[in-house]
Image (cartoon, rainbow, N blue to C red):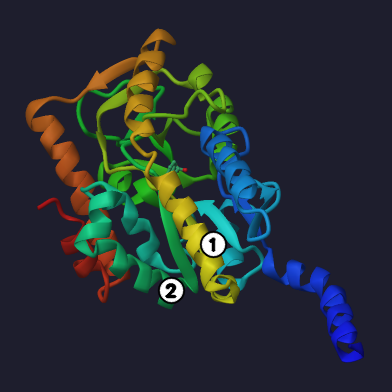
Protein backbone atom coordinates (compact mmCIF):
# COMPACT_ATOMS: atom_id res chain seq x y z
CA UNK A 1 0.00 0.00 0.00
CA UNK A 2 2.65 2.52 1.01
CA UNK A 3 4.80 2.20 -2.12
CA UNK A 4 1.63 2.76 -4.12
CA UNK A 5 0.86 5.96 -2.18
CA UNK A 6 4.36 7.23 -2.84
CA UNK A 7 3.96 6.52 -6.50
CA UNK A 8 0.72 8.51 -6.63
CA UNK A 9 2.27 11.37 -4.71
CA UNK A 10 5.28 11.40 -7.02
CA UNK A 11 2.98 11.40 -10.06
CA UNK A 12 0.94 14.30 -8.64
CA UNK A 13 4.08 16.33 -7.94
CA UNK A 14 5.36 15.68 -11.45
CA UNK A 15 2.12 16.78 -13.10
CA UNK A 16 2.74 20.52 -13.43
CA UNK A 17 6.19 19.94 -14.96
CA UNK A 18 4.79 17.35 -17.32
CA UNK A 19 2.00 19.65 -18.42
CA UNK A 20 4.48 22.48 -18.93
CA UNK A 21 6.74 20.25 -20.96
CA UNK A 22 3.78 19.15 -23.05
CA UNK A 23 2.63 22.60 -24.04
CA UNK A 24 5.35 24.25 -26.10
CA UNK A 25 5.36 28.02 -26.50
CA UNK A 26 6.80 29.44 -29.70
CA UNK A 27 7.76 33.07 -30.21
CA UNK A 28 6.36 34.57 -33.42
CA UNK A 29 7.37 37.80 -35.17
CA UNK A 30 6.31 39.55 -38.35
CA UNK A 31 8.68 41.19 -40.83
CA UNK A 32 5.71 43.27 -42.04
CA UNK A 33 4.33 46.25 -40.11
CA UNK A 34 1.72 45.59 -37.47
CA UNK A 35 -0.97 47.63 -39.18
CA UNK A 36 -0.79 45.54 -42.38
CA UNK A 37 -3.54 43.13 -43.34
CA UNK A 38 -0.92 40.36 -43.34
CA UNK A 39 -0.44 40.86 -39.59
CA UNK A 40 -4.18 41.12 -38.90
CA UNK A 41 -4.71 37.76 -40.58
CA UNK A 42 -1.71 36.31 -38.75
CA UNK A 43 -3.10 37.42 -35.39
CA UNK A 44 -6.50 35.93 -36.14
CA UNK A 45 -4.80 32.65 -37.07
CA UNK A 46 -2.70 32.67 -33.90
CA UNK A 47 -5.83 33.15 -31.83
CA UNK A 48 -7.42 30.13 -33.49
CA UNK A 49 -4.27 28.03 -33.03
CA UNK A 50 -4.08 28.93 -29.35
CA UNK A 51 -7.75 28.15 -28.87
CA UNK A 52 -7.46 24.73 -30.41
CA UNK A 53 -3.96 24.01 -29.18
CA UNK A 54 -4.50 24.21 -25.42
CA UNK A 55 -2.09 21.81 -23.73
CA UNK A 56 -0.28 21.17 -27.02
CA UNK A 57 1.13 24.37 -28.44
CA UNK A 58 0.98 28.09 -27.81
CA UNK A 59 2.03 30.84 -30.20
CA UNK A 60 3.22 34.03 -28.56
CA UNK A 61 3.11 36.98 -30.96
CA UNK A 62 5.98 39.32 -30.11
CA UNK A 63 5.30 41.96 -32.78
CA UNK A 64 6.48 43.46 -36.04
CA UNK A 65 9.59 45.36 -37.18
CA UNK A 66 9.72 47.32 -33.91
CA UNK A 67 10.62 44.05 -32.21
CA UNK A 68 12.97 42.82 -34.95
CA UNK A 69 13.77 45.01 -37.98
CA UNK A 70 12.38 43.71 -41.27
CA UNK A 71 15.68 42.68 -42.84
CA UNK A 72 16.96 41.03 -39.64
CA UNK A 73 14.02 38.69 -39.14
CA UNK A 74 15.57 35.95 -41.30
CA UNK A 75 18.70 35.79 -39.19
CA UNK A 76 16.61 35.85 -36.02
CA UNK A 77 14.85 32.71 -37.27
CA UNK A 78 18.09 31.08 -38.43
CA UNK A 79 19.76 31.55 -35.04
CA UNK A 80 16.68 30.80 -32.96
CA UNK A 81 16.28 34.27 -31.43
CA UNK A 82 12.66 33.74 -32.49
CA UNK A 83 10.92 30.48 -33.33
CA UNK A 84 8.55 31.47 -36.13
CA UNK A 85 8.37 34.40 -38.53
CA UNK A 86 5.94 35.66 -41.07
CA UNK A 87 8.18 37.05 -43.77
CA UNK A 88 8.94 37.03 -47.47
CA UNK A 89 12.04 35.71 -49.18
CA UNK A 90 13.14 39.18 -50.28
CA UNK A 91 13.60 40.14 -46.64
CA UNK A 92 16.11 37.36 -45.88
CA UNK A 93 18.39 37.11 -48.91
CA UNK A 94 21.11 37.99 -46.36
CA UNK A 95 20.60 34.46 -44.98
CA UNK A 96 20.58 32.66 -48.36
CA UNK A 97 19.91 34.20 -51.78
CA UNK A 98 17.51 31.50 -53.03
CA UNK A 99 14.85 32.83 -50.64
CA UNK A 100 13.86 35.54 -53.12
CA UNK A 101 12.96 32.98 -55.82
CA UNK A 102 9.54 32.20 -54.29
CA UNK A 103 8.13 35.32 -56.00
CA UNK A 104 8.73 33.53 -59.32
CA UNK A 105 6.41 30.56 -58.82
CA UNK A 106 3.97 30.27 -61.70
CA UNK A 107 1.57 27.80 -60.07
CA UNK A 108 -0.49 27.97 -56.87
CA UNK A 109 1.19 26.65 -53.74
CA UNK A 110 -1.26 23.72 -53.64
CA UNK A 111 0.22 22.54 -56.96
CA UNK A 112 3.76 23.16 -55.76
CA UNK A 113 3.04 20.73 -52.94
CA UNK A 114 1.85 18.07 -55.38
CA UNK A 115 4.63 18.57 -57.95
CA UNK A 116 7.44 18.24 -55.42
CA UNK A 117 8.56 21.85 -55.93
CA UNK A 118 7.89 22.61 -52.29
CA UNK A 119 9.85 19.54 -51.13
CA UNK A 120 12.85 20.99 -52.92
CA UNK A 121 12.20 24.39 -51.34
CA UNK A 122 11.97 22.69 -47.95
CA UNK A 123 15.39 21.05 -48.38
CA UNK A 124 17.07 24.31 -49.45
CA UNK A 125 15.46 26.22 -46.56
CA UNK A 126 16.67 23.56 -44.09
CA UNK A 127 20.22 23.33 -45.41
CA UNK A 128 20.91 26.96 -46.11
CA UNK A 129 18.63 28.75 -43.66
CA UNK A 130 18.32 26.35 -40.72
CA UNK A 131 14.59 26.84 -41.28
CA UNK A 132 11.56 24.65 -41.65
CA UNK A 133 9.37 26.07 -44.43
CA UNK A 134 5.87 25.82 -42.98
CA UNK A 135 3.32 27.45 -45.30
CA UNK A 136 2.73 30.13 -47.88
CA UNK A 137 0.00 32.40 -46.64
CA UNK A 138 -0.04 35.01 -49.42
CA UNK A 139 -0.30 34.32 -53.16
CA UNK A 140 -2.49 35.48 -56.07
CA UNK A 141 -1.13 39.01 -55.61
CA UNK A 142 0.85 40.36 -58.56
CA UNK A 143 3.48 42.99 -57.88
CA UNK A 144 3.18 46.42 -59.46
CA UNK A 145 5.22 49.51 -60.03
CA UNK A 146 3.57 52.57 -58.42
CA UNK A 147 4.71 56.00 -59.64
CA UNK A 148 4.35 59.71 -59.11
CA UNK A 149 5.81 60.56 -62.52
CA UNK A 150 4.21 59.49 -65.74
CA UNK A 151 5.92 57.09 -68.14
CA UNK A 152 4.70 56.06 -71.60
CA UNK A 153 6.99 53.11 -72.22
CA UNK A 154 8.86 50.53 -70.14
CA UNK A 155 11.78 52.83 -69.34
CA UNK A 156 12.61 54.13 -65.87
CA UNK A 157 15.70 56.13 -66.77
CA UNK A 158 16.05 59.11 -64.46
CA UNK A 159 13.58 57.78 -61.89
CA UNK A 160 14.41 56.78 -58.34
CA UNK A 161 12.39 53.80 -57.17
CA UNK A 162 12.04 52.21 -53.75
CA UNK A 163 12.78 48.48 -53.94
CA UNK A 164 13.45 45.30 -52.06
CA UNK A 165 15.29 42.39 -53.70
CA UNK A 166 11.92 41.49 -55.31
CA UNK A 167 12.19 44.35 -57.82
CA UNK A 168 15.86 45.28 -57.76
CA UNK A 169 17.10 43.45 -60.88
CA UNK A 170 13.97 44.24 -62.92
CA UNK A 171 13.73 47.97 -62.18
CA UNK A 172 17.50 48.32 -62.62
CA UNK A 173 17.20 46.62 -66.02
CA UNK A 174 14.56 49.25 -66.90
CA UNK A 175 17.08 52.00 -66.13
CA UNK A 176 15.89 53.07 -62.67
CA UNK A 177 18.04 54.19 -59.79
CA UNK A 178 16.94 52.01 -56.90
CA UNK A 179 16.82 52.51 -53.16
CA UNK A 180 16.00 49.72 -50.72
CA UNK A 181 13.69 50.33 -47.77
CA UNK A 182 11.55 48.23 -45.48
CA UNK A 183 7.78 48.73 -45.93
CA UNK A 184 7.76 50.88 -42.81
CA UNK A 185 9.89 53.56 -44.49
CA UNK A 186 7.98 53.88 -47.77
CA UNK A 187 5.56 56.62 -46.65
CA UNK A 188 8.34 58.94 -45.47
CA UNK A 189 10.37 58.34 -48.65
CA UNK A 190 7.32 59.35 -50.73
CA UNK A 191 6.46 62.29 -48.50
CA UNK A 192 9.98 63.70 -48.75
CA UNK A 193 10.14 63.08 -52.47
CA UNK A 194 13.20 60.88 -51.98
CA UNK A 195 11.68 58.38 -54.41
CA UNK A 196 9.49 58.74 -57.51
CA UNK A 197 7.79 55.43 -56.95
CA UNK A 198 7.92 52.00 -55.39
CA UNK A 199 7.19 48.35 -55.90
CA UNK A 200 4.37 46.65 -53.98
CA UNK A 201 1.71 43.99 -54.61
CA UNK A 202 -1.74 44.91 -55.92
CA UNK A 203 -3.11 44.86 -52.37
CA UNK A 204 -2.05 46.79 -49.32
CA UNK A 205 -1.17 50.36 -50.33
CA UNK A 206 -3.99 51.70 -48.14
CA UNK A 207 -2.73 49.93 -45.00
CA UNK A 208 0.05 52.49 -44.53
CA UNK A 209 -1.66 55.40 -46.36
CA UNK A 210 0.64 55.29 -49.38
CA UNK A 211 -2.37 56.06 -51.61
CA UNK A 212 -2.15 59.64 -50.30
CA UNK A 213 1.25 59.91 -51.99
CA UNK A 214 0.73 57.82 -55.13
CA UNK A 215 -0.49 58.99 -58.54
CA UNK A 216 -0.06 56.04 -60.91
CA UNK A 217 -0.02 52.26 -60.99
CA UNK A 218 1.68 50.56 -63.90
CA UNK A 219 -0.05 47.51 -65.40
CA UNK A 220 0.45 44.66 -66.04
CA UNK A 221 1.53 43.23 -62.72
CA UNK A 222 4.40 40.76 -62.53
CA UNK A 223 5.47 37.76 -60.37
CA UNK A 224 3.35 36.61 -57.42
CA UNK A 225 3.76 38.07 -53.94
CA UNK A 226 4.87 35.49 -51.43
CA UNK A 227 4.51 35.72 -47.67
CA UNK A 228 5.26 32.60 -45.67
CA UNK A 229 5.64 31.15 -42.20
CA UNK A 230 9.16 29.92 -41.46
CA UNK A 231 10.26 28.07 -38.33
CA UNK A 232 13.69 27.82 -36.70
CA UNK A 233 14.80 24.26 -37.47
CA UNK A 234 16.04 23.49 -33.94
CA UNK A 235 12.78 24.70 -32.41
CA UNK A 236 10.93 22.58 -34.97
CA UNK A 237 12.94 19.48 -34.04
CA UNK A 238 12.40 20.10 -30.33
CA UNK A 239 8.64 19.77 -30.81
CA UNK A 240 7.03 16.37 -30.33
CA UNK A 241 5.60 14.59 -33.35
CA UNK A 242 2.11 15.53 -32.13
CA UNK A 243 3.03 19.20 -31.83
CA UNK A 244 4.63 19.27 -35.28
CA UNK A 245 1.57 17.57 -36.69
CA UNK A 246 -0.77 20.06 -35.01
CA UNK A 247 1.21 23.06 -36.24
CA UNK A 248 1.45 21.65 -39.75
CA UNK A 249 -2.30 21.06 -39.92
CA UNK A 250 -3.06 24.55 -38.65
CA UNK A 251 -0.62 26.13 -41.10
CA UNK A 252 -1.99 24.13 -44.02
CA UNK A 253 -5.50 25.22 -43.09
CA UNK A 254 -4.28 28.84 -43.15
CA UNK A 255 -2.62 28.28 -46.52
CA UNK A 256 -5.84 26.67 -47.71
CA UNK A 257 -7.56 30.05 -47.35
CA UNK A 258 -5.39 31.68 -50.01
CA UNK A 259 -8.29 32.13 -52.42
CA UNK A 260 -9.07 35.09 -50.18
CA UNK A 261 -6.25 36.94 -52.00
CA UNK A 262 -7.96 36.62 -55.39
CA UNK A 263 -10.97 38.54 -54.17
CA UNK A 264 -8.77 40.98 -52.29
CA UNK A 265 -6.84 41.75 -55.50
CA UNK A 266 -10.10 42.71 -57.21
CA UNK A 267 -11.26 44.79 -54.24
CA UNK A 268 -7.98 46.64 -53.99
CA UNK A 269 -7.92 47.35 -57.73
CA UNK A 270 -11.37 48.94 -57.38
CA UNK A 271 -10.41 50.83 -54.27
CA UNK A 272 -7.34 52.27 -55.99
CA UNK A 273 -9.51 53.51 -58.86
CA UNK A 274 -11.94 55.08 -56.39
CA UNK A 275 -9.04 56.79 -54.63
CA UNK A 276 -8.09 58.40 -57.93
CA UNK A 277 -5.03 56.34 -58.79
CA UNK A 278 -4.52 56.39 -62.54
CA UNK A 279 -3.46 53.29 -64.40
CA UNK A 280 -0.58 53.44 -66.86
CA UNK A 281 -1.40 50.40 -68.96
CA UNK A 282 1.44 49.04 -71.06
CA UNK A 283 -0.06 47.10 -73.93
CA UNK A 284 0.89 44.77 -76.73
CA UNK A 285 4.61 44.61 -77.47
CA UNK A 286 5.40 47.02 -74.62
CA UNK A 287 3.63 44.83 -72.11
CA UNK A 288 5.49 41.81 -73.46
CA UNK A 289 8.86 43.57 -73.23
CA UNK A 290 8.02 44.62 -69.68
CA UNK A 291 7.04 41.14 -68.50
CA UNK A 292 9.85 39.35 -70.36
CA UNK A 293 12.34 41.70 -68.76
CA UNK A 294 10.77 41.15 -65.35
CA UNK A 295 11.26 37.38 -65.46
CA UNK A 296 14.59 37.40 -67.33
CA UNK A 297 16.19 39.89 -64.95
CA UNK A 298 14.91 38.09 -61.85
CA UNK A 299 15.94 34.59 -62.91
CA UNK A 300 19.33 35.82 -64.07
CA UNK A 301 19.78 37.28 -60.58
CA UNK A 302 18.66 34.10 -58.80
CA UNK A 303 20.89 31.89 -60.97
CA UNK A 304 23.90 34.17 -60.63
CA UNK A 305 23.54 34.06 -56.84
CA UNK A 306 22.84 30.34 -56.77
CA UNK A 307 24.27 28.39 -59.71
CA UNK A 308 23.54 25.29 -57.62
CA UNK A 309 19.80 25.69 -56.97
CA UNK A 310 18.72 28.52 -59.29
CA UNK A 311 18.28 26.47 -62.50
CA UNK A 312 16.46 23.68 -60.65
CA UNK A 313 14.09 26.16 -58.98
CA UNK A 314 13.32 27.75 -62.34
CA UNK A 315 12.44 24.37 -63.72
CA UNK A 316 10.29 23.43 -60.71
CA UNK A 317 8.44 26.78 -60.58
CA UNK A 318 7.44 26.77 -64.25
CA UNK A 319 3.83 26.32 -65.27
CA UNK A 320 3.43 23.00 -67.01
O1 LIG B 1 8.48 45.14 -49.39
C1 LIG B 1 8.19 44.72 -50.50
O2 LIG B 1 7.84 45.44 -51.44
C2 LIG B 1 8.25 43.28 -50.74
O3 LIG B 1 9.29 42.76 -51.07
C3 LIG B 1 7.01 42.48 -50.53
C4 LIG B 1 7.07 41.09 -50.69
C5 LIG B 1 5.90 40.35 -50.50
C6 LIG B 1 4.73 40.97 -50.15
C7 LIG B 1 4.69 42.33 -50.00
C8 LIG B 1 5.84 43.10 -50.20
List x then y, in percent, for residue 62. 70, 50
Residue 74 in view (yes/no) = yes
Say which of 171 and 260 sits in front: 260
Q: Residue at x 27, y 43 (%)?
A: 223
Where residue 22 sits, quadrant-wise, is bottom right
Residue 230 in view (yes/no) = no
Q: Is disc 1 placed on a helix, strand or loop?
A: helix
Where residue 273 sits, quadrant-wise, is top left
Where residue 74 sits, quadrant-wise, is bottom right
Indicate whether 174 appears above or below 169. above
Q: Is disc 2 placed on a helix, strand or loop?
A: helix
Label 1, label 2: how many angstroms apart (C-alpha)? 13 Å
Furthest residue toward front: 1
Indicate whether 63 appears above or below 190. below
**Label annotation for residue 74:** 1
**Label annotation for residue 44:** none
Pair 1/2: label in front: 2
Indicate whether 72 appears above or below 6. above
Quadrant placement of the N terminus: bottom right
List x then y, in percent, for residue 69. 63, 52
**Label annotation for residue 126:** 2
Neighbor class of circle 1 (other Cα within 10 Å; few <14, some 14-19, many 20+) is: many
User: Is 231 placed left or right of 12 in the picture?
Assistant: left
Q: Residue at x 45, y 21 (%)?
A: 214
Q: Are marks 1 and 2 in contact (CB under 8 Å)?
A: no
Say which of 220 and 84 sits in front: 84
Say which of 32 and 305 sits in front: 32
List x then y, in percent, for residue 146. 38, 28
List x then y, in percent, for residue 215. 41, 17
Q: Residue at x 8, y 27 (%)?
A: 284
Neighbor class of circle 2 (other Cα within 10 Å; few <14, some 14-19, many 20+) is: some
Amino acid sequence: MWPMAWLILAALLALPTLAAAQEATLKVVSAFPENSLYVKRLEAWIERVNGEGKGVLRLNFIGGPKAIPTFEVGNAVRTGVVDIAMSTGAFYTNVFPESDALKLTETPVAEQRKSGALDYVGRVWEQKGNMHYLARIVEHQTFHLYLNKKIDRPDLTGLKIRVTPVYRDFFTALGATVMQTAPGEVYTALERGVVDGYGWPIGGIFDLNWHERTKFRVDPGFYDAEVSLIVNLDAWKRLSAAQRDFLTRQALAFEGQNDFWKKYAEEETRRQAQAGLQVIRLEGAQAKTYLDKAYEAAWAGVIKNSPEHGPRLRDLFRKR
